Amino acid sequence: MMYTRGQFAIIGKVGRKALVIIGVVAAIMALVVGYKDERI
């Protein structure tokens, strides 16, 4: 697939934000699951 430089820049910004959000959510989920496992 071919993208113009502008499209690639936009995709890069959105992709980076998405990765950060996914990372944060995954970290929170891991903490919650770990906390529940320790409590039980």
Image (cartoon, rainbow, N blue to C red):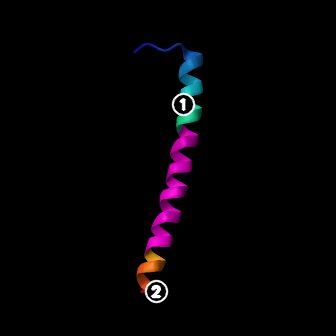
- Residue beneath label 2, please? 39
36 is higher (above) or lower (below) than 9:
below
**Tag 1's secondary structure?**
helix
The mark that comes first in sequence, 2 or 1, is 1
Determine which of the numbered discs, if any, sits on residue 21 in the image.
Answer: none
Instruction: State how far apart marks 2 and 1 are (Cα).
Output: 40 Å
**Residue 16 at x, y = what percent?**
54, 39
13 is higher (above) or lower (below) than 28:
above
Q: Give the total number of marks visible in the rendering.
A: 2
Q: Residue at x 60, y 17 (%)?
A: 6
Q: Which residues are magenta?
A: 16-33
**Residue 7 at x, y = what percent?**
56, 19
- Residue beneath label 1, please? 12
Amino acid type, callout 2? Arg
Q: Residues within 10 Å of mark 2 (few under 14, many from 20)?
A: few
For the C terminus, give its image quadrant. bottom left
| Magenta portion: prevailing SS class | helix
